Image (tube, rainbow, N blue to C red):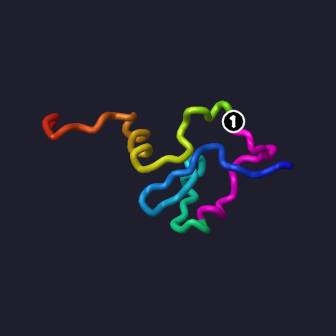
Amino acid sequence: PICSYHKAPPVFHETAKFWSCCPNKKAYDWEDFQAIPGCQTGFCTDVKDDDLQGKKEFLGGCDLRDAANGESQLKSIDDF
């Protein structure tokens, strides 16, 4: 059967919940988050994609900061 899904992992940052492939569709409670429709369609399967092996299954605030800053290291107070 054909199903609807998101192509990228979810993000849980503070109270916001959204799919990293659909950043403009944020939810603040679990039911609303689960109701966000998928952005891709394909055939349903319960087998994990080999392309996702070793990648994170969900993202958080530190992942968003790293992506925005080019994965820069945190600075020590001595670096200022």
Task: State the residue lying farthest toward the right.
Answer: 1
Residue that mark 1 sits on? 49
Task: State the residue lying farthest toward the front.
Answer: 47
Residue 4: give x, y in percent of width and height.
Answer: 75, 52
Name the one closer to the observer, 24 or 77: 77
Residue at the image point whose x is 86% and y is 49% from the top: 1
Residue at the image point whose x is 23% and y is 37% from the top: 75
- Is 71 placed above or below 3 here? above
Residue 31: give x, y in percent of width and height.
Answer: 61, 68
Q: Which residues are magenta?
A: 33-49
- Regarding mark 1 in the picture, which secondary structure is present there? loop
| Left or right: 11 in relation to 39 | left
Q: Residues within 10 Å of mark 1 (few under 14, many from 20)?
A: few
Q: Quadrant of residue 42?
A: top right
In magenta stretch: residue 16: no
| Left or right: 67 in relation to 43 | left
